[in-house]
Image (tube, helix red, strand yellow):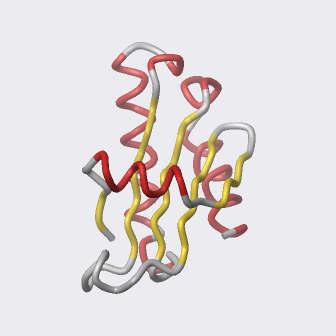
Amino acid sequence: MRFIISTREYESVYQKNTKLENELFIFLVQKEIPEQEIPEKNFAVGIVVSKKVGISVIRNKVKRRIKAFLREKKECFPTNTKIVIIAKQKAGNADWLGIKQHLSELFNRI
């Protein structure tokens, strides 16, 4: 697993994606990526938490919780896939169990 950093990668996922969403998150999923775009690491993820979620402390807490979930479940991710996880405003008020439940629900739908 690796994190999407460049603007170009984010834009490619925004343009060619399948959208999944629930109460707390939106997933933009781009499947069947050629091997050369994601060499040896066959899963890439980007995290977007806007200022609507809350102050920086809350936004960073949401990002940390998403990353913790990703570390726990890294063996279950689909291959040759890029995912951008966008946190909705309600994610700032959610507890750890709620975040885990909503992320699991979306990953199971991929």
How many numbered tags mark residues here? 0
Q: Nearer the viewer, residue 96 or 23?
A: 23
Residue at 55% across, 74% down = 31
Residue 49: where, in percent of width, then height? Answer: 45, 32
For residue 19, above or below residue 39: above
Q: Nearer the viewer, residue 6 or 2?
A: 6
For residue 5, above or below residue 94: below
Q: Nearer the viewer, residue 88 or 76?
A: 88
To which quarter of the image does residue 92 belong?
top right
Residue at 63% across, 45% down = 26
For residue 85, above or below residue 51: below
Residue 78: where, in percent of width, then height? Answer: 52, 79
Residue at 60% across, 52% down = 27
Residue most toward the top? 55
Residue at 67% across, 52% down = 101
In this rendering, would 73 be left or right of 63? right
